[in-house]
Image: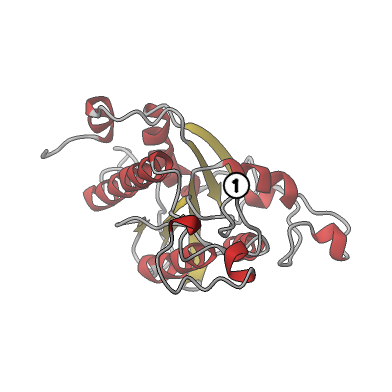
């Protein structure tokens, strides 16, 4: 399918994604209404999701008072205020989570690190199968910046997501970086006045498209399968003293 646009790919699919929910979390350091380059790149992802009738929620995390810590509600651990519980409702409801982060000093943003720590605060919770709470959900990441580090940042974020239980499909990261040092960022107007920086980058457009569709396909498969099978990964059964030494239909 040479030169197919994301819009053409969306209209040609016969798969129904209409019962899926997605959440994008922008981990920019810029509060609204200031423009965010990460938000512009997330927009490519969001357009594909919405085109395929996936219910979409969006969060710019820095606009909320997210207390540091690794508990579900940090007001129970000394924080004066914590908006995380309201964000968690969206995370918990989403079949697909896409984290967007800029690169600062070669790393994900401090806001992104705080998000991962707060996700980790729920890692001991379980679903109705006794599995960790993030089982059956898919995760991906997009990265923007003016310095090297897309793969490094993607590696860290995707490791964190799979560690707490997210399923990571193939090609689950994408990004765009400009020339090293000061200069235009993704979505800035070109000096020539002819378009915007990065919008015509085929490598980025391709990887963002592949990532989004892979997340959608994986979420569809997990939903249709009723999640990940229970055998061998149920915390509840493990704590009951059952060690899954041999296959047993009772545990499925």
Residue 55, how many percent across, how many down? 50, 31
**SS for dot 1:** helix
In terms of depth relative to the viewer, which is nearer, 124 or 12?
A: 124
Q: Is residue 2 left or right of residue 5?
A: left
Q: Which of the colour schemes (rainbow, by chain, secondary structure, one colour) is used?
A: secondary structure
- What percent of the width, then of the height, locates residue 181? 41, 68
Where residue 175 sits, quadrant-wise, is: bottom left
Q: Position of residue 166 (x, y in %)?
A: 48, 57
Query: Which residue is label 1 attached to?
Result: 91
Tell me how many marks there are.
1
Considering depth in this image, is 231 or 142 the residue closer to the camera?
231
Residue 203: give x, y in percent of width and height. 24, 53
Q: Quadrant of residue 242?
A: bottom right
* Pick the front one: 2 or 18: 18
Where 174 falls versus 44 (above or below)? below
Residue at the image position 35 percent from the left and 43 percent from the top: 221
Task: Note whether residue 131 is visible.
Answer: yes
- Residue at x 22% of width, y 34% of height: 5
Pointer 1: residues within 10 angstroms few (<14), some, or many (20+)?
Answer: many
Judge left or right: residue 176 versus residue 101: left
Q: Please state, as top left, top right, bottom left or bottom right, where the N terminus lies in the image.
A: top left
Residue 245 to residue 157: above or below: below
Residue at 62 percent across and 57 percent down: it is 126
Q: Is residue 246 left or right of residue 93?
A: left
Residue at 72% over, 52% down = 84
Would residue 79 be visible to someone looking at this image?
no
Query: Is 6 situated above or below 212?
Result: above
């Amino acid at each position: 399918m040479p030169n197919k646009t994301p819009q053409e790919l969306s209209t040609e699919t016969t798969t129904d994604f209409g019962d899926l929910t997605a959440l994008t979390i922008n981990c920019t350091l810029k509060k609204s209404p200031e423009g965010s380059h990460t938000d512009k790149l997330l927009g490519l992802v969001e357009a594909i999701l919405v085109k395929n009738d996936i219910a979409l929620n969006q969060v710019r995390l820095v606009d909320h008072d997210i207390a540091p810590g690794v508990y579900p509600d940090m007001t129970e651990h000394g924080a004066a205020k914590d908006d995380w519980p309201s964000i968690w409702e969206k995370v918990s409801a989403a079949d697909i989570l896409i984290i967007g982060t800029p690169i600062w000093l070669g790393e994900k943003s401090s806001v992104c690190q705080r998000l991962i720590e707060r996700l980790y605060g729920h890692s001991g919770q379980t679903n109705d199968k006794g599995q960790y709470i993030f089982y059956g959900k898919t995760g991906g990441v997009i990265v923007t910046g003016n310095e090297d580090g897309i793969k490094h940042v993607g590696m860290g974020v995707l490791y964190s997501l799979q560690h707490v239980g997210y399923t990571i499909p193939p090609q689950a990261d994408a990004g765009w970086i400009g020339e090293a040092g000061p200069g235009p960022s993704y979505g800035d107007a070109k000096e020539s006045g002819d378009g915007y920086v990065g919008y015509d980058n085929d490598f980025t457009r391709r990887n963002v498209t592949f990532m989004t569709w892979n997340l959608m396909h994986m979420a569809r498969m997990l939903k249709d399968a009723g999640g990940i099978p229970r055998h061998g990964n149920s915390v509840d059964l493990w704590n009951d003293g059952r060690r899954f030494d041999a296959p047993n239909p009772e545990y499925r």
